[in-house]
Image: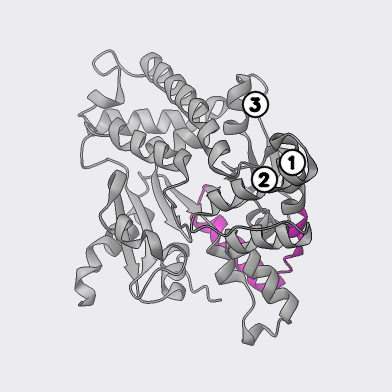
Amino acid sequence: MSDSIWNPPQALLQDSFSDAGRHTVLVVGAGLHRQLGPSGKHGCDKSAAECFGLLADWNELITSVASDASLKSVRHADPSASWESLVAEMAKRESLQAGVAEKKLLQAVAAKLKCAQYSKTQIGVFGALLHERFDDVISLNIDDCVLRALQSALGVKPAKVSDGSVKKFKSHLATRYECRLGDKKMRVWFPHGIATKPSNIILGTRNYGMMLHELNDEFNEMKKWEAKSLPKSGRSANTIKSARTWKRTARKMLQSESSLTWVRLFMVCDLVFMGVGLDRAETDLWWALNQRQRNLARVSQSVRPHTFYVTVCNGDQHGGRNGIHLATGPAGIIPVHYGSWDDAWTAVLGCQFHG
């Protein structure tokens, strides 16, 4: 296929970055560790390479946790199913309630994630590029790589923020880490929790499913906010046909920090998925993406937020088995293809960033 076929999505992605009127959010997954991980030119030893292999592949991580615990590991194509099998195996062997067994396994996962030792120069460059390009980053990983990158680049440790006034169900959705440098504030969100608090990690089919009612409750809260904030002529985002009205509404939502959650970012911002497999078992993400598509159906096309899925032309090594499905553009996804992951990361971060 000629490169010209892929140019329109690439151009649309760059327009998202250059248009000051659009708020673009990076959604990053385990593929980040393939870019930051060791290669021959970094001179990393075998143990470092193995560690990054765990960070970049959920099934490898689960298999390693099982091996350390001398548990039988069933490696399914879907990592969520692999996790559920492991929880059941530990519960059976230890005669524990499944929830108790899962908590023990989550602690083991968190311990594994501490192994990563990044190149100070490389992670500092990554953090600086993130800070320059984005105001919000949603990390689907549960490690603290993004926070460490920002601290390395800015010399400021991102601080955990959670509005105590929000409802209990919403506190997890509203929790983020913020760092300021001058007038620039940046937020990092962890929809699936973070390893520094293992009990909050969301992993596996059951837990993804348990999130759905929280997401739905938060979406309903957002619609109530819209009803109070929108002009009487357009009480729902589904009826906003004026580009001016939509821009004003989205801007006001982003400025209402006390009620801001990663779900609301999903609903009103351009999203750039990078290094993300978007496995169909991640029902929470697919719920949010499809709800976003429904909610934006009647928003003026000229200002409707885009959902970019960045990948490579010669096979997506972060989620190849999902390639055909994602290529069809489910939930409004726009596949954006590049010739290599180096090119893809450079395009997303606005500057050369090589593994």
For the record, the magenta segment spans 111-136
Q: Which secondary structure type mostly characterizes the magenta part of the structure? A: helix
Crowding around mark 3 (Cα neighbors within 10 Å: few <14, some 14 to 19, many 20+) is some
In the picture, residue 223 is in which quadrant? top left
Q: Secondary structure at mark 2?
A: helix
Task: Please provide percent x and percent y for residue 126.
Answer: 59, 65
Left-right relation of 328 to 147:
left
Q: Amino acid at mark 3?
A: Asp
Q: Secondary structure at mark 3?
A: loop
Observer-side mark, 1 or 3, equals 1
Above/below status of 96 relative to 48: above
Q: Amino acid at mark 2?
A: Val
Find residue 101 and name its label. 1
Which residue matches tag 3?
163
The stretch drawn in magenta includes residue 129 = yes
Task: Please provide percent x and percent y for residue 77.
Answer: 49, 59
Foreground: 110 or 60?
A: 60
